[in-house]
Image (cartoon, helix red, strand yellow):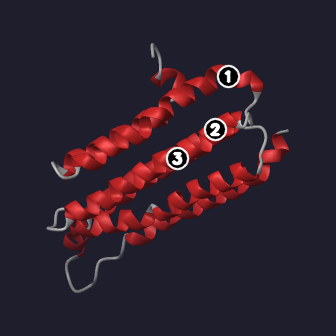
Amino acid sequence: MQNETARIEAFSDGVYAIAITLLILEIKVPPATQPLTRGLLAQWPSYFAFLVSFWFIGVMWVNHHRLFTHIRKADNGLLFANLLLLLGVTVVPWPTSLLAAHLGKPDQLAAAVVFNGTYFFLGIFFNILWRYAVHKRLLDPAAQTSASAISKQYAVGPLLYLICLGLSWISVPASLAMNVALAVFFALPPKKTMAGG
C-alpha cells in the first residue's frame, strides 16, 4: 500500500524543493555604484520575505509529509487535489517577491493582501486534499486518532488566514506577525496543538 503514494510524494517533494530554492533568487547582489554595507542593509525587506517564506514552505512540506504518513491509497481525485495544493506552493515565490519589493513603501498594503491571500488559498487547498482523502477512505485505518487531530487543526486554518488577510487593512505588520504565528501553529504536531480540544 505504501508504494501507491510514493510517486505522489516524490513529485511533491521535488516541487517543494524547487519552490523553496527559487526564493533566494529574489536576493540580489547590491550594485557596485553604492557602498556595499548600505546596499546590503537596504535589502532588509528581501531578507525578511525570504526567511518568512522559506519557513512557510518548509512548514507546508512538513505538513504534506504528515498527511502522507496517513494517506495509504491514491485515486485520480487525490492526484488532482494534490496538484491543486502544489499549484499554491509554486506561487509562493511571487507574492514573496512582491512583498519584498513593497514592504515599508506606499504599496505595501496591496503586496500584503496578495501575500496573505496566497496563504488563505493554500489553507483551503490543504483542506481540500485532506478532506478528500478522509472522505474517500484513503487513510491508514490504524491512524484514526491522529487523523482526527489533523482534521481539527486544519478546519481552523482558512478562517484564521482570512482574519490575517482582513488584518492587512488595519496593520500590515500585525497581519504579517499573525501569518508567522500561524506558521508556528501549523508547524506543531496536531496532537499537541489540539490538546484539550
Q: Which structural element holds mark 1?
A: helix
Q: Quadrant of residue 49?
A: bottom left
Image side of residue 31 versus residue 66, left or right:
left
Quadrant in the picture for the C terminus: top left
| Disc 1 and disc 3 in contact, CB within 8 angstroms | no
Q: Earlier in the sequence, mark 1 or mark 3?
A: 3
Residue hosting label 1 = 144
Q: Is residue 167 left or right of residue 140?
A: left
Residue at 20% x, 49% y: name it: 173
What number is the disc on residue 60? 3
The three-letter code of the residue at mark 2 reads Leu
Marks 1/3: CA–CA distance: 22 Å
Judging by the rendered image, the residue that carries numbered circle 2 is 67
Q: Are there few (<14), some (14-19), or many (20+) residues within 10 Å of tag 1?
A: few
Q: Which mark is residue 43?
A: none
Q: Is residue 172 visible?
A: yes
- Check disc 1 and give the amino acid type: Gln
Residue 51 in which image quadrant: bottom left
Q: Position of residue 167 (x, y in %)?
A: 22, 46
Quarter of the figure that contains the N terminus = top right
What amino acid is labelled 3 in the image?
Met
User: Across the whole image, how many numbered discs are drawn on residues?
Assistant: 3
- Is residue 128 left or right of 93 when viewed as pictured? right
